[in-house]
Image: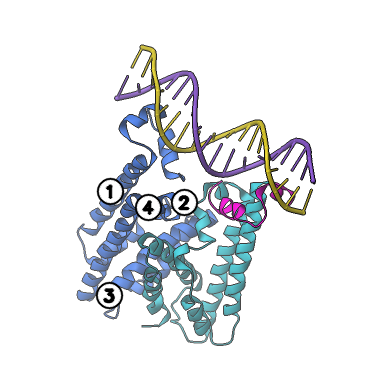
Chain colours: A blue, B cyan, C yellow, D purple
Amino acid sequence: MGTSPKAIQQRAEAGQGSMYHHFSGKPALALAAIERTAEEMTGRAEAQFSAAGTAKERLLAYLRRSRDVLRGCPIGGLTQDPDIMADPALRAPVTSTLAWLRGRIAGLVAEGVAAGEFDAALDPERTATAIVAVMQGGYVLARAADDAGLFEDAIAGILPLLGEH
Amino acid sequence: MGTSPKAIQQRAEAGQGSMYHHFSGKPALALAAIERTAEEMTGRAEAQFSAAGTAKERLLAYLRRSRDVLRGCPIGGLTQDPDIMADPALRAPVTSTLAWLRGRIAGLVAEGVAAGEFDAALDPERTATAIVAVMQGGYVLARAADDAGLFEDAIAGILPLLGEH
DNA sequence: GTCTATACTCGGATAGAC
DNA sequence: GTCTATCCGAGTATAGAC
């Protein structure tokens, strides 16, 4: 398979020979790794989404929190792995994690619109999709240029959408 | 190596044995493939950027043109290939192509701002970075959900930034 | 210049001792 | 339950005929 499992597999503490007692094979190991990563990602995001403050404050805090940008998004990057995308079991957590993120942010945008924090003309779903896309694309641009600043620039570029100039 | 070369290499018309007359090895083949892809991408984009119409019209036409979304961006996706990112010669065209795109779009944004088509508060560089990021991220979201509509939604989500509601 | 055959290397998986 | 040794297959590359 591609990259994800190999890296984690052979750098694990125990030798790779004994690994087959815990996992039936590479897909099972990959699934465990992906689910673990997805839970970490959603857990951290949910902590900020459900913190104190207005919807706008929480959304901006999430967008501005520090990230290991040059490593790329550990979930979004899997989209490029043919082996993962070809296996429905491996693909499902990637699909659902990103869908959850979009939905959660759409809720925040709707909440902010209702509270008068955001332009009433904003479509919550599309805006949320654009926000998640800017982050995913920010990772791509930052990696391509080996410059984490491009992630920040991409985020800064859409902030006017949220009334931040 | 990862995915790009293998796919193109073994599906080529001539047997792989004779390939070593034209290319010294896999990196050379990959470089040719990447450069060819980059030229196609910049060529198509430039054709729309330098067409007739206002800056805003040309930018919107580029954003809305049909794409093979579910295949992902043939350049941006390379960002996820460790072998490509580890080789400066292979990485360079990926870096420069995306940088060119950002620069070209920043120019259009600046032109539109000067012409009064866009909000004067827009920062051309950051806005361009956000636009390219939304496209790159749109590919990611569309692939993750196996739904090209998410690419369209991501684009639609940033259009308010360009005065399109 | 292109083909077939072959060799090398590495990731993935199994066997069996301990 | 973990280790070492070994096997298998795919991807990469070379040799040499035509």
First along the sequence among labels 4 and 2:
2
Highlighted magenta segment, given as a residue range: B1-24
Cα distance between the residues tagged 4 and 1: 10 Å
Q: In this rendering, is residue B117 above or below A32?
A: below
- Chain letter of disc 1 in the image: A
| Residue marked by disc 1 | A39
- Whether tag 4 and tag 1 are in contact, CB under 8 A, the answer is no
Secondary structure type for disc 2: helix
Q: Position of residue A23 (x, y in %)?
A: 33, 35
First along the sequence among labels 1 and 3:
1
Residue B48: image quadrant is bottom right
Cα distance between the residues tagged 1 and 3: 30 Å
First along the sequence among labels 1 and 2:
1
- Chain letter of disc 4 in the image: A
Q: Is residue A54 left or right of residue B69?
A: left
Secondary structure type for disc 1: helix
**Is the residue at mark 4 from the same chain as the one at mark 1?**
yes
- Whether tag 2 and tag 3 are in contact, CB under 8 A, the answer is no
| Residue marked by disc 4 | A75
Secondary structure type for disc 3: loop
Q: Amino acid at mark 2?
A: Leu
| Residue marked by disc 2 | A70
